[in-house]
Image: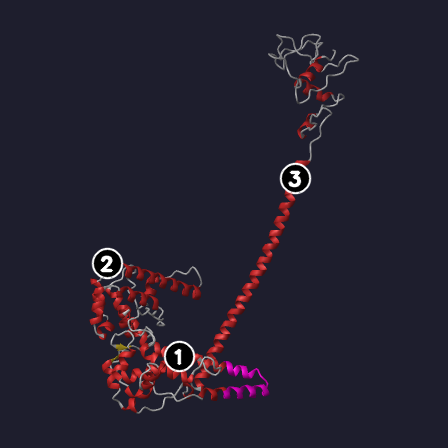
Amino acid sequence: MELWYLVAGVLASVVAVPIDRSKKKDEKQIKPESPDTGLYYDRYLREVIDVLETDTHFREKLQTANVEDIKSGKLSTELDFVSHHIRTKLDELKRQEVSRLRMLIKAKMDAEQGENVQIDHLNLLKQIEHLDPKNAHTFEARDLELLIQAATKDLEHYDQAHHEEFKRYEMLKEHERREYLKSLDEEKRNAAEARFQQMKEKHKEHPKVNVPGSRDQLKEVWEETDGLDPNEFNPKTFFKLHDTNNDAVLDEQELEALFTKELEKVYDPKNEEDDMVEMEEERLRMREHVMNEVDTNKDRLVTLEEFLKSTEKKEFLEPEEWETLDETQIYTEEELRQYERELAEQEAEIAHKVEQLRKEHEDLQRRQSELDAQKKEYQQALQQMEQKKSQQKDKAPPSGPGGELKFQPPEAAADVRAPVNEPAQVQPEVERLDRAPGHQADNPQPPGHQANHPLPPGHQANHPLPPSHQANQPLPPGHQAAPPAPAAHDPEEKQAEQAVPL
């Protein structure tokens, strides 16, 4: 982890582990987990550092490099000399980071403009400063240079961003308190206000807080944390004791570990009046104060030389009193009013979106009801059709005594024979009679035969009948005209027709 601590000292991204005197020096220390730096690419940064730490060549170059070379990115040229499997791991880390950034960009665009929006990932990735977007597949020296430069720049503004966030937190607390008081009647409001002032006064009742980095403050740590005689306080020994990773510098987190005793004087998580968010802001203020007094080259690291020089200053020996947060004005009344206006605008916008969503929900419910009604109608119609089909299948057709079907197709009604007393229809029906094999329908009948009798062999249909045998000649008394043949030429019906006497 030495490599990580050295780079993280520049990047301010690691927490120092407090010293535990109960452990032996030769006991194997557990590798501390590096904390979140607050950067949106924090994981990518830590993973790259962890991979580079495993390469012997790069590790040696980093240990001999000065802070300015690291911050400027000059060290990135040594990336060309690392082993192949290290480069392969770095390539994979970069591909994962590019993929993650693309997903974040798409999610943001979908939230702002809706889904199915065409996204120009390349142009959007160009706004990312911690990697080279033109090459999304391999990790090159340029990527390491950009990563270090971006992390250094972003972390320089991290403290200020943290202060602004804390200010908004405090203004929100005060806004909510005032809104709560407005909801009470006068008696309850006065009681709540009195309790609030009582809690503020109780919070101020704490032991004296030493100025961070002063002789008194460091001697207190020397005595209570390190368990050493305060009369034997030695700045050089103190520095080496609290350089927990033995990298010859105190980074920001190693310094913050020195302020724990002072913070415990003011903040107790068991006390209702103590806010732990304020405690972390107080820790940040203490660290900034020490850095401003001790870190002369502003590299966010304290060397032994810088530390020893700071112990010679008047501020170290005779410091002024330290003002805690409860004694400091975090925001002005005008800033609070401006913040409340912004909150009102945000609430109005949220209310408008809620109303839109409510209307959309009602519209969807109405459309769903209509679809459900249509679905019910379709289901009923389908059920009726199924019932009709089932009834038609179950109904058997009529049958005779022998089981034969008595079904007569509708077209059979057109073949009903004409009545006998209609002579105009006799001739057409005679012409429809079936003929014997080999005979034509127009063969003339021999003398003494009627038109309805079959012709003997050798007679043609076109021969004229004798005068006494005309087709339209009336029949003798007692004889009736042959009935017309039915449409279906049944042989039994033909024999019956031939048996009619002349």
98 over 245 or under it: above or below: above
Residue 348 lies, in percent from the top left, at: 50, 74
Residue type at mark 2 is His
- The quarter of the picture where residue 365 lies is bottom right
Q: Which of 129 and 34 lies nearest the eye of the viewer?
A: 34
Query: Nearer the N terminus, badge 3 or badge 1?
Result: 1
Q: Residue at x 52, y 69 (%)?
A: 354
Which label sits on residue 280? Answer: 1
Q: How is the image coloured?
A: secondary structure
Residue at mark 3: 390
Do the residues under discs 3 and 1 have CB atoms within 8 angstroms? no
* Residue positioned 44% across, 85% down in the render: 334
What amino acid does circle 1 point to? Answer: Glu
Q: Quadrant of the N terminus?
A: bottom left
Q: Residues within 10 Å of mark 1 (few under 14, many from 20)?
A: some
Report the Cα–Cα distance between label 2 and label 1.
Answer: 43 Å
Percent of width and height locating residue 98: 33, 62
Question: In terms of secondary structure, where does tag 3 sit?
Answer: helix
Residue to which mark 2 is pinned: 84
Q: Residue at x 50, y 75 (%)?
A: 347
User: What secondary structure is found at the residue carrying circle 2?
Assistant: helix
Question: Which is more toward the observer, 316 or 125?
Answer: 316
Asked which secondary structure carries label 1, the reply is helix
* Image depth: mark 3 or mark 1 in front: 1
Q: Nearer the viewer, mark 3 or mark 2?
A: 2
Residue 33, quarter of picture: bottom left
What is the magenta range? 176-198
